[in-house]
Structures are given as structure tokens and as C-alpha cells.
Amino acid sequence: MRARPCARIPTAICLAAIVALLGVTAAALAAKPIKGAAYQGKLKLTHASSVTYPISFKVSANGKRVSGFSLPHGYPVYCQGGGFGQQQAASSTISKTGRFTVKLPIYFAPAHQHQGFVIITGAFAKHGKESGTVRTDFTKSPVCNGTATYTTTG
């Protein structure tokens, strides 16, 4: 026997409600950063897995922003040479799912020249852990671009 169109409406409404509930539950279960914490860890260059550099940043007191990124040995550069600028400060919001992307401008002061960005993408996990990637994006020297992975703990 075939169901009438009116009998299908409650099923469709029920399925829509279940999907909406699962979406809210997933957002609620997303890992949150530790409010006001300083996260510290290691950046691992992908082309030389034994080489690591320190990385750190801070989470705002309300847990909604990341800032104060520090790569003490500079940022990953995947070519020889010099004359690379310094990374500048920037901040980013943290999504409801615990993810962020921040673009730190690279500025070469002697030539008053913007050279590109250090792009840091991260995701918070349970128990104060966080991980992501650091990508360099040089506008005039794309051969020097590259990506490294990192992990931090708050």
C-alpha cells in the first residue's frame, strides 16, 4: 500500500529535527580552547622531519580570539638566500567548532615592502591540545613557499 503525501510530512519534519539536533550537538561537543591560556609547542618542517622549532600563541580571556603568535626562529622558508622580512602581528577569531586561520603579514622594512604572509591554521582538541599548519606564502618568490605542521598544548 502506498503512503499518502500527508503521511510523509511528519516523517520529513522529524528527520529535519534530528539533523538539526545533531548539528547543535556536534557544535556543543567541539573542543574549546582554554580561556586566557598561552599555548606552546613545536613546529615540524615537513621536508626535514627531525628539525623542530618552537611556536606559541595566546587565547583571549573570553576564549574567542587567538593572537601573539611567536615563531622565535622565524618562519619556515623553503629556499636558500636572505632578505626575508619579519612577520607582523595579527589575530583571528576562533570558530564555534574550535578552528582558526590567521594571516601574519611579512614586511621587509629596509625596502618598505610587503613580501607575503605566514598563514597559521589550527584546531583545538580536548585536554588543552591544539594542532595545525604553518604555511608561507611569498608573493614574489613562490619557490620559497612551503607548509609545516605543529602541535601545541595550553
Image (cartoon, helix red, strand yellow):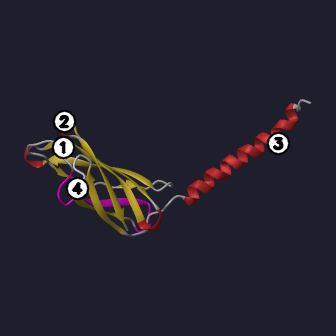
Task: Name which of mark 1 and mark 4 comes first in the sequence.
Answer: 4
**Residues at circles 2 and 1 in contact by the CB criterion of under 8 Å:** yes
Residue 136 visible in the displayed image: no
What segment carries the magenta color?
61-75
> Mark 2 is on which residue type?
Val
Q: Is residue 30 above or below residue 105?
A: below
In this view of the protein, can residue 59 be seen by the observer? yes
Q: Amino acid at mark 3?
A: Pro
- Label 3 packing within 10 angstroms: few (<14), some (14-19), many (20+): few
Rate crowding at label 2 as few (under 14), some (14 to 19) or many (20 or more) other CA atoms within 10 Å: few
Please check the rendered image and state whether residue 135 is part of the magenta-colored stretch, yes or no. Answer: no
Left or right of residue 12, residue 101 in this image: left
Which callout, 2 or 3, points to the residue nearer the camera? 2
Q: Is residue 73 magenta?
A: yes
C-alpha distance separating marks 3 and 4: 58 Å
Q: Among all residues in the image, which is located at the extreme top?
A: 2
At x 32%, y 56%, the residue is: 150
Disc nearest the viewer among 3 and 4: 4
- Tell me: residue 37, above or below residue 136: below
Q: Which callout, 4 or 2, points to the residue nearer the camera?
A: 4
Instruction: Look at the numbered discs 1 and 4 and tell me whether their residues touch, using CB distance below 8 Å.
Output: no
The residue labelled by disc 4 is: 50
The answer to whether mark 2 and mark 3 are in CB contact below 8 A is no
In the rendering, which numbered label is found on residue 78? 1
Find residue 2 and report its image quarter: top right
Q: Secondary structure at mark 3?
A: helix
- What residue appears at the point 22 percent right and 55 percent down from the top-left corner? 50
Q: How many marks are shown on the rendered structure?
A: 4
Location of mark 2 (residue): 143
- Single out the mark in the foreground, 1 or 4: 4
Distance in Å between CA atoms under marks 2 and 3: 58 Å
